[in-house]
Image: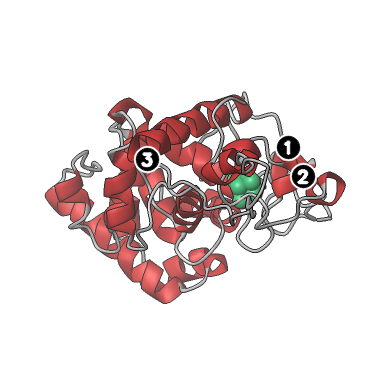
Amino acid sequence: MGEQAPGKASGRARSAPEGKGSAKKPRVPKPESHLAMVRRARRINRELAEIYPYAHPELDFRNPFELLVATVLSAQTTDLRVNQTTPALFAAYPTPEDMAAASPEALEELIRPTGFFRAKSRSLLGLSQALRDDFGGEVPGRIEDLVKLPGVGRKTANVVLGNAFGVPGITVDTHFGRLVRRWKWTEQEDPEKVEAEVCAIFPKSEWTMLSHRVVFHGRRICHSRKPACGACPIAPLCPAYGEGETDPEKAKKLLKYEKGGQPGQRLSPPPDYPGLPAPPLGAQAAPQP
Ligand code: SF4
């Protein structure tokens, strides 16, 4: 796979010259230069594009309003749970005007499965009223406007801009932050600083798809607690190889969604998705290994 991660590259340390007094010195790994890291990062992105050519946002949506609402609902829960909840919600309130006129109790009941339903209901009512009153019932396509909507932060705004308006953006969620730190693209913990440092490594045109690919990898292979290193196609480029299971057979069992033969998170995945659609709310999910 070409360039190697620093840990790997230094694995072939030159041996000390043999002869008298040639005591073995401990191997000191050479620090990776910024340029080498950028090359390795871009290589990882290219590899991920081959592994996940079908990478996409994992929230079901048909228009910017649905994506905005789904992203607000996705706080503190899974995309699957949101996708199982939104069909009934959008059937009842298909437009910002409809949702703005909803009773808080009715809205809470519909979004209850996503958790924190009182706060989320307040956000949805507030943002639909703002869309109705200040933006002519349309979701604005500028970050300055989006972040002023109730319950909408920079992360949500970037998701909406990148996926409903085609404005390039990097979305730093828990998966993205974890993986880019494992890959030594950044040491930052603060999502805005992570975003700025990763944006500087890649051309703008890559930002949105890079976000999807990294999150896909985090959800399927490079998990938080048990990364499946032994089944990871980018292992030769990863400085954190070995943080998880390295035995190929055991690692294979840790793979999730389409990589593990299980349903995905979207009830309506894009046509090129090679896995199974998620089951609707209440339906029996496929058994997890
Ligand atoms: S080698 Fe391990 S830590 Fe590195 S990306 Fe793959 S699964 Fe994650």
What residue would you read off at disc 1?
A: 276
Query: Does the CB distance between marks 1 and 2 fall below 8 Å?
Result: yes
Q: Amino acid at mark 2?
A: Gln
Q: Marks 3 and 2: which is nearer the front?
A: 3
Q: Name the image quarter holding residue 273.
A: top right
Q: Which amino acid does the dot numbered 3 rest on?
A: Ser
Q: Dot 3 surroundings within 10 Å: few (below 14), some, or many (20 or more)?
A: few
Question: In the rendering, which numbered label is found on residue 262?
Answer: 2
**Dot placed on the residue nearer the N-terminal end, 1 or 2:** 2
Mark 3 and mark 2 residues within 8 Å of each other at the beta carbon: no
Mark 2 beta carbon near ligand 1 (under 8 Å): no
Residue 116: % across, % down? 46, 74
Q: Secondary structure at mark 2?
A: loop
Which image quarter holds the N terminus? top right
- The answer for how far apart the CA atoms under marks 3 and 2 are is 40 Å
Cα separation, mark 1 vs mark 2, equals: 7 Å
